[in-house]
Amino acid sequence: MPDVIVFDLYGVIARTQSPEAVRRIEEIAGDPGPAFWDAYWSCRPAYDAGQESTAYWAEVARLLGTALPDVPALVEADLDSWTDVDDTMVALVHELADEGRTLGLLSNIISDLVPRFEARHGDWLSRFDTLTYSCRIGVAKPDPRAYEICAGDLGVDPADVIFFDDTERNVLGARETGMRAELFTSPDQVRTLVA
């Protein structure tokens, strides 16, 4: 029975952006079309690794070859789009913690979002033995150092960890460090694999 379980945050415990949130961001950005999202995502790794929000949005605008009309509103809408959670997974976190499992969270997350997310979800986040955020360690998954830092924060070797992420490249990155890593599909999958 694995006693050390590490979860990704977005797409596993927390929800990804809803269609409504996506539309709100597009409206603020002036309905820029698919090129906007290409720039949004291609610039995200540096943002996840600790880049300031103004620098991130400036780089998005540079790639688009335009000025964005209201950057503070974009920052706010973007932060708000990443704060919802899956209550079933939150219940599973409590369940595993109550069983005495050692829990870690390893998330690619921007620095401005951390205090907002922690203020809203501090109750269940407190059940984790460590919270490893890309913006605080300066590297993002699938960089091997992210997994190694998380395992080190938990006081274990990567080989002692079972890791769940919804993104295949992050699962493969974890496996390269020796973690047992699984592509997340459901709470039932987690229960089965950690039983």
Image: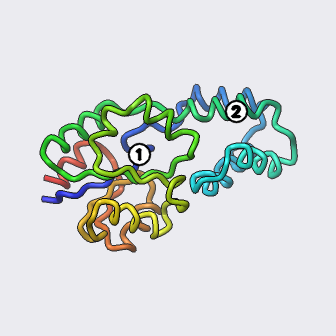
Q: Which residue is drawn at 25% across and 41% down?
A: 93
- Specify the label residue 55 is tagged with: none
Q: SS for tag 2?
A: helix
Q: Is residue 83 left or right of residue 79?
A: left
Relative image position of residue 40 (x, y in whole percent): 68, 46
The kind of residue tagged 2 is Leu
Looking at the image, tell me whether mark 2 or mark 1 is earlier in sequence order.
1
Quadrant housing residue 180:
bottom left
Amino acid type, residue under disc 1 in the picture: Leu
Labels 2 & 1 near each other (Cβ < 8 A) = no
Q: Residues within 10 Å of mark 1 (few under 14, many from 20)?
A: many
- Residue 80: image x %, image y %? 56, 30
Q: Mark 2 points at which residue?
A: 74
The residue under the point 78% across, 46% down is 58
> Residue 9, which numbered label?
1
Residue plotted at (53% across, 62% down): 139
- Give the image quarter of residue 183: bottom left
Does residue 15 sit above or below 41 in this rendering?
above
Element at label 1? loop
Q: Position of residue 83 (x, y in %)?
A: 48, 32
